[in-house]
Amino acid sequence: MKLGIVGLPNVGKSTLFNAITQAGAESANYPFCTIEPNVGVVAVPDDRLDKLAEIYTSKKIVPTAIEFYDIAGLVKGASRGEGLGNKFLSHIREVEAIVHVVRCFENDNVVHVDGGVGPLRDIETISLELIFSDMEMLERRIQKSQKAAKTDKAIAAEVEVMKKVIAVLEDGKSARVLDLSDDEKEIVKSFNLLSSKPIIYVANVSEDDLMDDGNTNPHVGTVREFASTEDAEVVVVSAQIEEEISQLDPEEKKEFLNDLGVEKSGLDKLIQASYKLLGLMSFLTAGPMESRAWTIKVGTAAPQAAGKIHSDIERGFIRAEVIAFDDLMAHGGSMTSAKEKGLVRVEGKEYIMKDGDVVNFRFNV
Ligand code: GDP
């Protein structure tokens, strides 16, 4: 689960990324995560784990995590190989979703690469590089496929979709705005286009704009308007404040947020939006050793969910004993009393997991 942070120079990417690495999850818990200087691992906040840990007197809480990849160095002309252009674009290709940081704060001491603050122009500058790169790739691919398309129906269908995508790109729009059938979507997925990757826009504001979620900052309004054309979410953040927050312990953080008049930190909002964007959800396990959240895609069946914990559990899967977190809480956290009420379900191989399922897997070794 990797998201790439992009944006023009001086918009606050590194500041946000620093906040991410400082808030960073304990990496020992996440052997699957990449440990590289430009990758930050953050825990996905989940209050349910604290409650479970209390009930089960767990020694440890292990939240699930996502990775943010700092993709710095985009300049105009990247798609033509300027600056670190090609390297930059290949890094974007590796991530599952894009976090596009847009500067919405005014500060005369921080130079803007293109003059003044102009979110729409900034978004377009970055988007166009991705669009150009996609266009070039698709055009090459069409050329190569043209002959085979005459005799191969599948390839002909591919070429048709490519033409449809190109028409949108030529209009200066990202491929993600396309309205496609399910079959077409599958085909587009196979192209791994940059401009079709799911995206979140981060409006980076100054401290004063936090309290009303950027509602009185016209730049934020511009970002929201643009994002709505792509059905994308906007998260309002002050990277500078996030950097400060990331150095606080949980109690201090609460107080600080209180003083700012906000409920959640921008980073927590971003993490939650990212999780949703990727179509992810969590199931939970709890015991005296640890209370833990596990990430799965929405629609995952019980055995594959078990496989997240260990491949042996998936292989030897017998059944899952499941209770919804809310049902457990409604019974004061008592498994026994919930069981008496028949709220602990026994589920088989076909069961599709739900967010917040507290699970015990039974399996053959
Ligand atoms: P990058 O080039 O996109 O990585 O930008 P940086 O994170 O290095 O930020 C550029 C400058 O903007 C730095 O001097 C930051 O301190 C400043 N900056 C970043 N975020 C904010 C913010 O939310 N508010 C204000 N006022 N300044 C910020």
Image: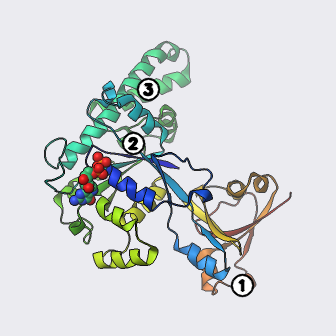
Q: Tell me which numbered mark, 2 or 3, is placed earlier along the sequence.
A: 2
Q: Amino acid at mark 3?
A: Glu
Q: Total of numbered circles in the picture?
A: 3
Taking the image as shown, residue 230 lies to the left or right of residue 40, namely left
Q: Residue at x 33, y 50 (%)?
A: 13
Q: Which residue is mark 2?
A: 71
Q: Residue at x 60, y 56 (%)?
A: 30
Q: Does the image show residue 173?
A: no
Which is more foreground, mark 2 or mark 1?
A: 2
Q: Nearer the viewer, residue 116 or 255?
A: 255
Q: Which residue is mark 1?
A: 341
Q: Tell me which numbered mark, 2 or 1, is placed earlier along the sequence.
A: 2
- Relative to 130, residue 4 above or below: below
Q: Which residue is mark 3?
A: 160
Q: Does the image show residue 149?
A: yes
Q: Percent position (x, y) of residue 243?
A: 35, 62
- Relative to 313, residue 288 above or below: below
